[in-house]
Amino acid sequence: MTAAVSGQAPARRATLFWGNLVLAVLVLGSAFAVIHSTHACRDLYTHLQALEARQWHLQEDYGRLLLEESTWASHYRVEKVARSELKMAEPDLARYEVVGR
């Protein structure tokens, strides 16, 4: 019986050794996968922050351009340019004509 027990012990040790080795390799592989995914997440978050900053600047420019457009298109300015630069004037009441339908 001691011969049978002593014969099984080296085989069991070899099985445990290889099993532990496989588990250690899997744990290391999992650790590297976590490191890689964390790094990728940080890179993507940095890229997202850069895009959000760009979007904020573009929104700011858009608002400024809308304000400028409304200034250029104001009725007062259009009338002023028409009178001064284009020499336009409102016709007298005598020159008005009513057109029938």
Image (cartoon, rainbow, N blue to C red):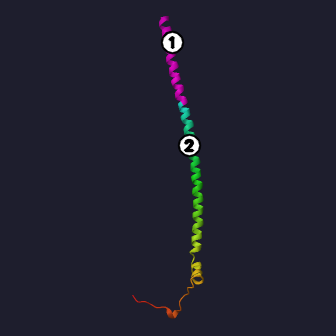
Residue type for callout 2 = Cys
Where residue 39 appears, as percent x and y from the top left, is: 57, 40
Residue 73 in magenta stretch: no
Question: Which label is found at residue 48?
Answer: none
Quarter holding the C terminus? bottom left
Main SS class of the magenta portion in the image = helix
Q: Nearer the viewer, residue 1 or 34?
A: 34
Residue type for callout 1 = Pro
Q: Is disc 1 placed on a helix, strand or loop? A: helix
Residue at coordinates 50% horizontally, 8% vertically from top-left?
6
Pointer 2: what residue? 41
Give the residues in magenta: 1-28
Residue 6 in magenta stretch: yes
Q: Bin the neighbour count of mark 1 within 10 Å (Cα to Cα): few under 14, some 14-19, many 20 and up.
A: few
Q: Bin the neighbour count of mark 2 within 10 Å (Cα to Cα): few under 14, some 14-19, many 20 and up.
A: few
Q: Quadrant of residue 90?
A: bottom right
Where residue 69 appears, as percent x and y from the top left, is: 57, 71
Q: What is the distance, in whole Å, between disc 2 and disc 1 at their CAs? A: 46 Å
Q: Quadrant of residue 32?
A: top right
Upstream in sequence: badge 2 or badge 1: 1
Question: Which label is found at residue 10?
Answer: 1
Where residue 100 appears, as percent x and y from the top left, is: 41, 89
Count of labels shown? 2
Q: Which residue appears farthest toward the bottom when viewing the image?
A: 94
Above or below residue 11? Residue 88 is below
Q: Nearer the viewer, residue 27 or 81?
A: 81
Horizontal placement of 96 versus 43: left or right? left
